Every structure is written in C-alpha cells, then in structure tokens.
Image (cartoon, rainbow, N blue to C red):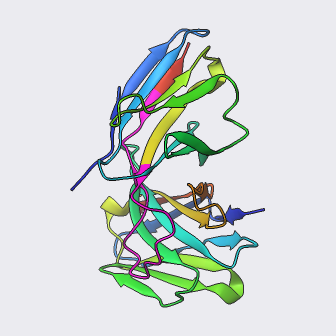
Amino acid sequence: EPEVTQTPSHQVTQMGQEVILRCVPISNHLYFYWYRQILGQKVEFLVSFYNNEISEKSEIFDDQFSVERPDGSNFTLKIRSTKLEDSAMYFCASMEEQGLDDSEGTYGYTFGSGTRLTVV
Amino acid sequence: AQKVTQAQTEISVVEKEDVTLDCVYETRDTTYYLFWYKQPPSGELVFLIRRNSFDEQNEISGRYSWNFQKSTSSFNFTITASQVVDSAVYFCALSETSNQAGTALIFGKGTTLSVSS
C-alpha cells in the first residue's frame, strides 16, 4: 500500500536554528499538507499546497515557516528560526484529488508517520 | 466557523465491552466531509473512515461502526467487543469543500480510549 514517508523521525535542534522537515507524498497525489501536534494536544492544520503553490494556511503558519516542492517528489517544511514552542510532532499528508463524491467512506488523506521536532 | 467537539477526553473500558466515541461538529457548508482517525501510542495517524454530508447511511466495518446524524450534527464511532489493541487516541475531523484547492482538516481534541484486559 502506498505510503507517505517522512524524514527524519525525530530531530533535536537548538533554538534559533533552521530546520527542514522532509516528506515524500504518494506519487500520484496532487494535494499536500503539513499539520502539527503539540504533545498531548489536537492535530492542527498548518498549510496546504496544490499546483506548486500554497492554497491555504493557518494563523500558525507565519513568516518563520515555508514550504517547497523542490523536485516533484519531495515536499518540505522549513522553520527558519526555531522557538521552544515549535516543539511538536509534524505530520505530512497527501491526497489524490479534492472533492470526490465518494460515499464508500474509504477515501481520505494519507498521513505520514510524523517527525518529532524537539527544540532545546 | 467550523468546529469539532469531542466531549469525552478519556474513556476506560474492559475488554469485550462496547464503547461509543462521540463527535459533534459545526459547519455552515452544506457539503462537507467527516473523518475518524486513530492515533496509537506509536504516534502515527491511521485513517478509519470518511463520510460525505450527503450520505447518512451508517457504516459498519468489522467491529467498528459509525452513526452519522445530520439532524444532531453528530458522527459517533462505536467499537464493539473492544480489544486491548484498540487503545489509542481517536480523532474526529471535518473538512469543508468550499475551498476546492486543498481544504484543511479540522480536528477535534481527541478521545483517549484505554482498554484493559
């Protein structure tokens, strides 16, 4: 079964450093997303990406964040100058096509296993 | 504004008990999708089901069943004959279709289910 792959699984970084979280979405998917989950809390939407541009972003996704699809397969999230509060699990997700009228109930976003970012 | 409420923070049951996880949502859209995800202790998000707003048929998949009621804006999830492996955090989520180019999933806060043997 196709998977969304995220690397690394765990990253520790010093406050103020830049980090790049990497994701390889499923190959025929068109929509890409980043979500984050602070420990013990709910999953929060950061940004969606379609047709090589950001289609939607949340208030969390400020100027410190950026996304890129540099080579047609990878999808990256960059945090320019990490803060302690950026410590969280970051999930990448992809979806084949938006708005399918699929009543079978078996279609959804596919999430990666996540990258746990620890800022010290 | 859209919102997903999972009022049950934690539920503890003994194996073989049935358990229902509640989900209530708010949306102004007439077309939307509802999801359930499971997050086991290992941390990944496992897709369980998607339902669109035009299909109120209940869904059964093995020991899992879902009850979607638009009249009460609820999309509840029942596990029949629970097992220890069902122990996880379960998230309900909502996606509206007003933005065709990548609508965000809005998650509830999750319900932690603990099943003891």
Q: Position of residue B53 (x, y in %)?
A: 58, 81
Q: Foreground residue, B3 or A73?
A: A73
Locate residue A59 relative to residue A115 in the image: left or right: right
Q: Is residue A110 magenta?
A: yes
**Which one is in front, B55 or B37?**
B55
Which residue is pictured at 78% across the width and 62% down the height? B1
**Of residues A45 and A83, which is closer to you in this image?**
A45
Instruction: Look at the image and give the residue range highlighted in magenta.
Output: A94-116
Q: In this view, does B16 lie to the left or right of A84?
A: left
x, y percent for residue B62: 29, 80
Q: Which residue lies furthest to the front in this view?
A: A51
Q: Where is residue A92 in the image (x, y as percent from the top left)?
A: 44, 41
At a point 35% along the width and 43% down the height, the residue shown is: A25
Q: Does B86 appear above or below B60? A: above
Which x, y percent locates residue A5?
31, 39
Point 49% across, 35% down: residue? A89
Q: Is B50 positioned to the left or the right of A16 in the image?
A: left
* Residue B116 visible, this orientation: no
Answer with the quarter of the image where residue A61 lies.
top right
Q: Main secondary structure of the magenta part?
A: loop
Q: In the rendered view, does B58 fall on the left or right side of A65?
A: left
